Amino acid sequence: MKKKLLSYLLIVVGGTMTAAAFGLFVLPQNFVAGGVTGLSVILQNLLPLPLSAIVLCINILLFLVGWLFAGKEFIFKTLIMTFLFPVLLDVFSQIDLFLPLSQDPFLSSLLAGCLLGIGSGIILRANGSSGGFDILGVVLNKKFRIPVSVVMYVCDCTVILLQAVSKPLLQTVYGIIVILVTSIMVNKVITYGRSEVQLLIFSSEHEKIRQELLHTFDLGLTFLQAEGGYHLDPSKVILTILPYRKINDVKKMIYTIDPTAFTVIDNVNYVGGRGFTISR
């Protein structure tokens, strides 16, 4: 129960940050924007409605599509931001507290990208959704196996291109900066505290190193049978996955035991199984 409440709280926090990014920086500077907000900006020129009302209408429409095709569990978490985001967007659009900061377009693009990226990353870490084109991506993925990222990319690019036609070049460039900073920050937030590296250790002292990895660093490992390419001598290679923060201490241990050890370190995109996604 506590985990669920924390999850919903994080979704609200993340959603508040994304709404602040649009209300305080993106919209006042008239940057091009992707997603439902960007589409709403386009439609605002055609409809006599406030921006927040248009966002709400589109979100409700997408929510109903998701309710029919995406499943209730996903949609329930999406429900929060479907109705909360337009309200928060309207609130932040009325706030003048950050007006001095929003006067600088470049600074506004950086701050907007950071807020959007951190907010979206928090929502994703809580296994939630900010609504909008996320829902469309999930539906098309379920029905036609189209990757969610592809759907969102196509939708965002289409919305941005439609805006870019009628906006000055500089505002389009700043909008692209917002999108780039957002993608960087989303990745940072999602991988924070979860980044692992793969370490291969070639050493004649593999048994001593094994003991240290198991008992000092509490790391699992696997022995790989190998053969030297020059002398064709059989040897054992240690394969282990460890958090990035431990890598310097592990390297120091290895070269203290065997100064001639050969090591290879590589980043990994995903680690699953016992000790990572399953308790030992």
Image (tube, rainbow, N blue to C red):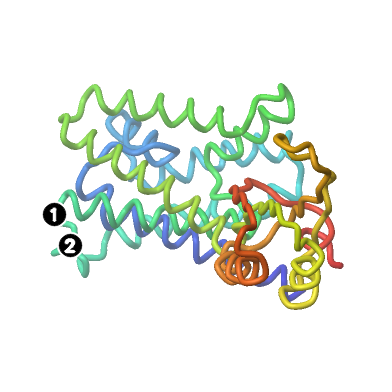
**Quick one: 36 or 146, which is closer to the camera?**
146
What is the C-alpha distance between the residues marked 1 and 2? 6 Å
Q: Is residue 9 above or below residue 262?
A: below
Label 1: which secondary element:
loop
Check disc 1 and give the amino acid type.
Asp
Q: Is residue 144 above or below residue 148?
A: above
Quarter of the image with the N terminus in it:
bottom right
Quarter of the image with the C terminus in it:
bottom right
Residue ID at (73%, 30%): 142
**Quick one: 25 or 53, which is closer to the camera?**
25
- Position of residue 154 measured from the top left corner of the image (x, y, whole percent): 48, 25
Q: Is residue 225 above or below residue 205?
A: above
Label 2: which secondary element:
helix
CB contact under 8 Å: marks 1 and 2: yes
Q: Is residue 61 left or right of residue 70?
A: left
- Position of residue 186 measured from the top left corner of the image (x, y, whole percent): 48, 51
- Numbered badge on residue 104: 1
- Position of residue 112 measured from the top left corner of the image (x, y, whole percent): 31, 53
Q: Is residue 178 left or right of residue 209?
A: left
- Numbered badge on residue 101: 2
Residue ID at (17%, 62%): 101
Check disc 2 and give the amino acid type.
Leu
- Position of residue 21 measured from the top left corner of the image (x, y, whole percent): 34, 55
